[in-house]
Image (cartoon, grey):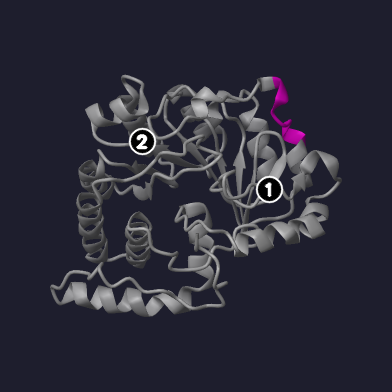
C-alpha cells in the first residue's frame, strides 16, 4: 500500500493549472509530525503539497516516516534550493521529484514565478553532483507545453534522471474545475511520440511508463480508465488537517468524502477498517470520473501487471521491428471493474 501525505497547502508558485496557492493552509492548522506515528507500515510515501519545503519541521516528519517505510519521496517545485540540499545531506536515501512544466520561458510562464526553471534545474544538477540516487522530475501537460515535454524527456534521458508525466486534472485538491485540453490532437500526438521513444529504451521500467502514457492519451480523449480505480484500497492520502482521503482527484460536484481524521483515533487501522472507510470505497467503485494520475494508476498497474504485460511485450516487439504504437486502439482491461465506474 502506498501513501501520499499532503503536508501543506502553502506554496510559493502561482501555477496556471493549480490554485492551491490561492487557498493556503494556516501554519497553525497543519498536523504536527507526531500524528504520523499512528500510520502503519507502507510500501512507500510521497510527500507533497503545496510546497513541502515550506514546512520547517519537515526533517522531523521524514524521520518519523522512515520508521514506517523504506522509501520517502518529496515532490517539490525546487524553489527552496538550499533546504533541499540540506535535506539530501541529512537523509541520503531520500528521493526528490522536481516539477518542471516546460523549457525555461514556458515553465516560468505556467508556474508564475520568474527563475523557477533555473532553480529546478540547479536542484537536479546539484542533487546529481551529491550522488543522490533517487532523483527525477516531471511535467504536467496542458494545452501549451506538450512539445516541451519531448525536450524535457531528452534532458532526463541524457542526465540519467527519472522523468514522469501527467495531464492536468480538475479536483478539490487543485481548486480548479476548468482545466481542459482543447488541442487534443497535438497533445496526443506528442504523447504518442513519447510512447514510441520510451519503448525504444532498454529498461523495462520505460516500457511500462509507455503504458502509463497511453492511459494519459485515453484520459485526454475522454475514455474510461484502462484499469479500475482502487483508491482507498491500494493507496491513501492524508491532507494537512489529518483527514484520510482515498485520493486527490475528487470533485465536490460529483462527490467528496473523508474516511476519517487521524486526530480522532489512536491508530490508523481504526479508520482503515471502519464502516465509513468501506462506504468511501463503494463511492470510489461508482465514481463517475476517469482520472489517470500516478498516485492511483501506479498501484493498480502493479497489482494487475500480468494483464498489461502482453500489451507491453507486443508494443516493445513492434518497436524493435521499427513499428510505432497504435494509440487509436486503446485496450480496456476487465479485471473485476465496476460497470458504473467512470460513467457520468
What are the residue bounds of the magenta stretch? 28-34
Q: Nearer the viewer, residue 7 or 118?
A: 7
Element type at marker 1? loop
Residue 107 sits in which quadrant?
A: top left
Residue occupying image coordinates x 25% and y 51%: 184
Q: Nearer the viewer, residue 172 or 191?
A: 172
Tell me the distance, in whole angstroms, between the alpha carbons under discs 1 and 2.
Answer: 37 Å
Marks 1, 2: nearer the viewer: 1
x 28%, y 73%: residue: 329
10 Å neighbourhood of mark 1: few (<14), some, or many (≥20)?
A: some
Q: Callout 2: few (<14), some (14-19), or many (20+) C-alpha neighbours within 10 Å?
A: many
Residue 96 visible in the displayed image: yes
Query: Who is closer to the viewer here, 87 or 169?
Result: 169
Residue 31 colored in magenta in the image: yes
- The residue to which callout 1 is attached is 257
Tag 2 or tag 1, which sits nearer the N-term?
A: 2
Furthest toward the left, the residue is: 322
- Label 1 close to label 2 by CB (< 8 Å): no
Q: Nearer the viewer, residue 275 or 301?
A: 275
- Reply above or below: 264 against 293: above
Residue 125 appears left or right of 241: left
Residue marked by disc 2: 124
Q: Quarter holding the N terminus?
A: bottom right
Q: Quadrant of residue 231?
A: bottom right
Q: Is residue 328 left or right of residue 242?
A: left
Q: Position of residue 12 (x, y in %)?
A: 47, 22
Residue 29 lies in the magenta-colored region? yes
The spot of residue 213 in percent (x, y) is 34, 59
Does residue 86 show up? no
Q: Residue at x 51, y 30 (%)?
A: 20
Amino acid at each position: 500500500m502506498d501513501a501520499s501525505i499532503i503536508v501543506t497547502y502553502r506554496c510559493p508558485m502561482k501555477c496556471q493549472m493549480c490554485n492551491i496557492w490561492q487557498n493556503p493552509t494556516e501554519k497553525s492548522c497543519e498536523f504536527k509530525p507526531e500524528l504520523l506515528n499512528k500510520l502503519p507500515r507502507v510500501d512507500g510515501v510521497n510527500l507533497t503539497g503545496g510546497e513541502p519545503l515550506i514546512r520547517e519541521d519537515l526533517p522531523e516528519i521524514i524521520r518519523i516516516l522512515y520508521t514506517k517505510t523504506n522509501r520517502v519521496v518529496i515532490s517539490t517545485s525546487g524553489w527552496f534550493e538550499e533546504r533541499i540540499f540540506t535535506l539530501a545531506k541529512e537523509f541520503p536515501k531520500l528521493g526528490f521529484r522536481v516539477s518542471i512544466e516546460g523549457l525555461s520561458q514556458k515553465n516560468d510562464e505556467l508556474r508564475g514565478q520568474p527563475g523557477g526553471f533555473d532553480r529546478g534545474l540547479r536542484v537536479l544538477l546539484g542533487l546529481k553532483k551529491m550522488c543522490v540516487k533517487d532523483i527525477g522530475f516531471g511535467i504536467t501537460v496542458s494545452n501549451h507545453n506538450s512539445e516541451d515535454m519531448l525536450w524535457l524527456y531528452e534532458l532526463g534521458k541524457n542526465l540519467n534522471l527519472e522523468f514522469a508525466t501527467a495531464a492536468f486534472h480538475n479536483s478539490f485538491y487543485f481548486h480548479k474545475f476548468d482545466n481542459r485540453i482543447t488541442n487534443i490532437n497535438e497533445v496526443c500526438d506528442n504523447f504518442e511520440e513519447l510512447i514510441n521513444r520510451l519503448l525504444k529504451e532498454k529498461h523495462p521500467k520505460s516500457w511500462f511508463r509507455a503504458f502509463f502514457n497511453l492511459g494519459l492519451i485515453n484520459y485526454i480523449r475522454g475514455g474510461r480508465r484502462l484499469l479500475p480505480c482502487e483508491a482507498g484500497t491500494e493507496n491513501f492520502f492524508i491532507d494537512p488537517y489529518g483527514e484520510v482521503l482515498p485520493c486527490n482527484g475528487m470533485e465536490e460536484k460529483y462527490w467528496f468524502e473523508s474516511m476519517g481524521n487521524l486526530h480522532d483515533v489512536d491508530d490508523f487501522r481504526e479508520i482503515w477498517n471502519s464502516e465509513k472507510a468501506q462506504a468511501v470505497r463503494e463511492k470510489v467503485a461508482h465514481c463517475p470520473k476517469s482520472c489517470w494520475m500516478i498516485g492511483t494508476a501506479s498501484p493498480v498497474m502493479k497489482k494487475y501487471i500480468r494483464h498489461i504485460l502482453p500489451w507491453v511485450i507486443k508494443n516493445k516487439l513492434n518497436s524493435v521491428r521499427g513499428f510505432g504504437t497504435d494509440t487509436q486502439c486503446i485496450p480496456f482491461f476487465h479485471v473485476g471493474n465496476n460497470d458504473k465506474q467512470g460513467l457520468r
